Image (cartoon, grey):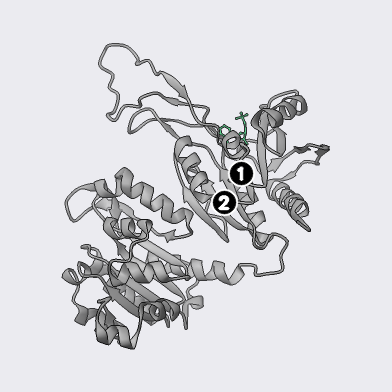
Amino acid sequence: MADHAILAGKRVLLVIAGGIAAYKSLDLIRRLRERGVTVRAVLTEAGARFVTPLSVQALTEDTVYRDLWSLTDESEMGHIRLSREADLLVVAPATANLLARMAAGMADDLAATVLLATDKPVLVAPAMNVRMWQHAATQANMALLESRGVRRVGPNEGVMACNEYGPGRMAEPMEIIDAIAALFAEDAHRPLAGLPLTGRHAVVTSGPTHEPIDPVRYIANRSSGKQGHAIAAALAKLGAAVTLVSGPTRLPDPAGCSVVHIETAREMLAACEAALPADIAVCAAAVADWRVDGASDRKLKKDGGGPPTLALTENPDILATLSRPGERRPTLVVGFAAETGDVLAYATAKRARKGCDWIVANDVSPGTGTFGGSDNTVHLIRADGTESWPTMPKDAVADRLAEAVAEHFAGK
Ligand code: C5P
């Protein structure tokens, strides 16, 4: 369990939207208050159908804010003040409807208005029917919100109130509290002004992509995401605001970064583009070159007719797309080249072909242990020459690359 000491004295504005999980929010209030957190609650109209304003009021020992137009609520506490007087906004349960309204920037009730008006961190705990969660619209809304820095906890998998099984259950109150504590801990460590990359935005891709064959099978590769995640963390340590776009990995989200989780190459490209503008792009992901053309939306069966033929089609090249000249091109675009022989020659050609500024080249021949391992031996290829770095841990490669990036921007 995370350390909850950091929670004492913090102020949370809790938005309770309309879902069956709203009953858990009552427990969340109680447990937050036990940890010294002041909780003020905004209840949506639908939320008030699941929990009574009276229960919320009794547990928060404060007014429950419900109406954008209420003369008393507004005169006592306008929506700007509501968000200003909080350290964090938590939306639990976050329904599909409220996530959609947040993504669209709507301000059609008090909850949406407060969420639009805030400059404080926002954590959402989605809760909805599994199909609503898996719907492309909800997934796109969530990815967009995450690319803007909204944090998420859950949803969990399990049997739902509607008797279906899958992801959609709201995270448990203690999981939400752990996520809140982690967010405050991150903030406490976040470097402030005065660091070399303060004020710069970096987009980093990391990990493999998963390209579906059918709902249960996919094409993937052996990338662990260690190097990309380390680079995201290293850039954040030097003060950059980092959006990490990550394929499926076993790694925890690195501290100080806003992380967008995706599965496919096309989702990775969309998330990168949504994160622009950026000063820096580092493409460290091992993106699948091909995906199955017309992946099946039903599990392929052994029906005696022999194995299926999978037709492949090319995935977009994210590095080449971000490197394309234009207004939205990041000032510095860095790619990776994993080669198995003649590393420098291939990597130099790749730099020209992709149109990026720098290439970090490494040898991934069997026996080097680079894929999934902790060490890396790389060469940094720039327009004016190549530097070969000694073998070192991936964290150290990341720190050295972040320093080179900082040097590049020094005085600019
Ligand atoms: O062409 P190749 O896969 O060897 O290029 C490697 C570099 O290109 C890496 O920086 C990788 O992140 C990036 N890449 C990409 N999108 C692809 C394929 C590779 O961003 N579809």
Name the quarter where the C terminus is drawn.
bottom right
Q: Is mark 1 within 8 Å of ligand 1?
A: no
Query: Which of the two residues, 41 or 156, is positioned nearer the viewer here?
Result: 41
209 is higher (above) or lower (below) than 148: above
Return the x and y of residue 367 as percentages of the image width and height.
Answer: 69, 29
Q: Is residue 93 left or right of residue 344?
A: left
Front one among 277 and 382: 277
Does 292 sit above or below residue 133? above
- Please name the amino acid that badge 2 sits on: Pro
Report whether residue 173 is seen.
no
Residue found farthest to the top: 305
Disc 1: which residue? 329
Earlier residue among tags 2 and 1 = 2
Task: Look at label 1 and name its amino acid.
Answer: Arg
Which quadrant of the figure shows ligand 1?
top right
Q: Which residue is mark 2?
A: 277
Label 1 neighbourhood size at 10 Å, few (<14), some (14-19), many (20+)? some
Question: Is residue 325 among what the camera can see?
Answer: yes
**Residue 267 position by quadrant:** top left
Q: How many marks?
A: 2
